[in-house]
Image (cartoon, rainbow, N blue to C red):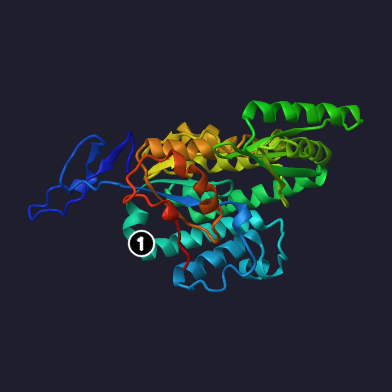
Amino acid sequence: MVADGKSPVACSEDRLGHRKFASYSVPDWVQHPQKLVPLKAAILFPGEQSSFSGMFHNMRKTPVVLGMLRAAAASLGFDIEEAMEDRGGSSGADQALAYVADCILFEAFREAHADVAERCQAVAGFGVGEYAALYAAGVITFQQGLEIVKVRSAALQDAGNQVHVEAIVVRGLALDKLERLMKAAQKLDAEDGVHDPQVAIAQYWCPGGYVCVGTGSTVQKLHDAAVGDKDAEVRLLPDQHAGHTSLAKGAGAKVAAVIERLLPAMKPPRCELFLNQSGRRVPPGKPPQAFADALMSHLSEPIQWESCVTQMMSWGIRQFYECGPNRSIRFMMRYYEHIIEAPFEILRPADFTESFSA
């Protein structure tokens, strides 16, 4: 894909040496028998909550995979496979591990399903998975992504050392009621003498589903209040960082500085790209400078995942492939089945997302 929403047309050069069709740009609305039409499919990349100990054990070590593991070790300063063995369920390196795993599994996916990988209509990633989506779309290189997630990991670790945060998952509670409960929890905490109590929605992860993050005592008060609602499903979420809230503004500024430095070397996406910060579509061929603000505010704004998915559906996407070490996105996507308008034979609820592992 190239700039201005135009796509290349594939054709071999003739005997007279005439210019290849692949070198021409044509608008998306142009129909041609030799034009490569995108598949109505999206590849989705999970975030840091998807990594687990030993996830690289059964991965086929191709030259590409080995090269990526070596590059990651050199850039991050630790051996990826050893870090997975030593993490014991929680590690400050989770973000980097998730990014590396997502990218490696995309290469494995590309090898096994080349047609889908190259002709997918769109890509999107949840949390740190967004950088794997940028890699898959050709916006950044694997090495550039390593630079970003390295700074992101360290910045969020620093933020976590300054403020103790907790998180809860809430589903089934009306948004206006949840907002009232958050304000009430902050007020109660302030009355108890807590300095600067905070809680905010960090993730809009499914229809009627939210992740709320904030200072520990404030989140606990919110949890206690929300549990009392008979229609709400509420549970504490362990090992959650302050990302995607105002508590991560300092960390977000550090990541934004890296993205700003890398921006001149970034490329337009080869396919549609749906971003966490806006939940909106970035068309193929759009210059990175045009959506740089969304990339740079990614860490200090909530994840608009519900909007990402519903927007993909509105653009005609009906097949979704999860490309990561676990099935966290598959779990989230099952909450969207009731809003899909597609024939049963095209989209079977049991196979709404497909999970691929090498």
Name the residue nearer the viewer: 319 or 139.
319
- On screen, residue 217 versus residue 277, left or right, reads right
Residue shown at 67% from the left, 51% from the top: 153
Residue shown at 34% from the left, 48% from the top: 344
Q: Which residue is mark 1?
A: 113
Quarter holding residue 71? bottom right
Q: Position of residue 197 (x, y in %)?
A: 82, 32
Residue shown at 90% from the left, 27% from the top: 191
Work out whether 328 lies above or below 288. below
Q: Position of residue 275 (x, y in %)?
A: 50, 39
> Where, quadrant-wise, is the N terminus in this rendering?
top left
The residue lying furthest to the front in this view is 230
- On screen, residue 329 versus residue 271, left or right, reads right
Q: Amino acid at mark 1?
A: His
Quarter holding residue 199? top right
Residue 208 in view of the camera:
yes
Secondary structure at numbered mark 1: loop
Within 10 Å of disc 1 (Cα), the crowding (few <14, some 14-19, many 20+) is few
Work out whether 1 lies above or below 293. below
Q: Position of residue 73 (x, y in %)?
A: 61, 65
Q: Position of residue 195 (x, y in %)?
A: 87, 31
The residue lying furthest to the right in this view is 193
Residue shown at 72% from the left, 39% from the top: 213
